[in-house]
Amino acid sequence: MCVLLSSVPNSDDNPRALTLEDYLNGKFQYKTFFPYWISSHEYLHQTAEDNIILYDVETEDSATILSNDTLRKVNASNYALSSDKQFIILESDHTKLWRYSYTASYHIYDLQYR
């Protein structure tokens, strides 16, 4: 999990240090996201629009791997990318059975022919 902290602007729009009063008064804002690291410098992330993007932290490049249309079509709840980045597996219909066991449906997409 990553937590992104945003600075609290003052009256002239310059960032200033976060204070306890900012936190207690509700002026402190944060956003969390859960990157899915696939290498030492690349991760997958599902955007607010439900697109799956690949982000390279070294070059700061990003690319949409899969659109939200595909995710919604199968009602995907989870995903994983193959090590060669050619296939993505989408999990849907997740049903818990007992403790750590569950059943689910899986859809494999060839990213070359999407």
Image (tube, rainbow, N blue to C red):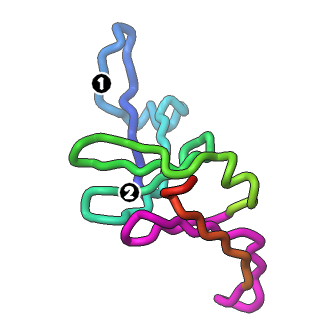
Left or right position of 22 against 7: right
The segment highlighted magenta reads: 77-102
Residue pushed farthest left? Answer: 58
The residue lying at 25 percent from left, 63 percent from top is 40
Distance in Å between CA atoms under marks 1 and 2? 31 Å
Foreground pick, 99 / 44: 44
The secondary structure making up most of the magenta span is strand
The disc labelled 1 sits on which kind of residue?
Arg
Residue pushed farthest front? Answer: 113
Left or right position of 85 against 96: left
**Dot 2: element:** strand
x, y (%) of residue 5? 39, 40
Q: Please give the residue where the numbered disc 1 appears in the rendered image.
A: 16
Question: Which image quadrant is residue 63 in?
Answer: top left
Q: Any magenta on residue 16?
A: no
The residue lying at 44 percent from left, 62 percent from top is 36
**Dot 1: element:** strand
Which comes before the other along the chain, label 1 or label 2? 1
Q: Please give the residue where the numbered disc 2 appears in the rendered image.
A: 43
Left or right position of 114 against 73: left
Residue pushed farthest top? Answer: 12
Pointer 2 local density, CA inside 10 Å: few below 14, some 14–19, many at least 20: some
The residue lying at 67 percent from left, 52 percent from top is 70
Foreground pick, 99 / 49: 49
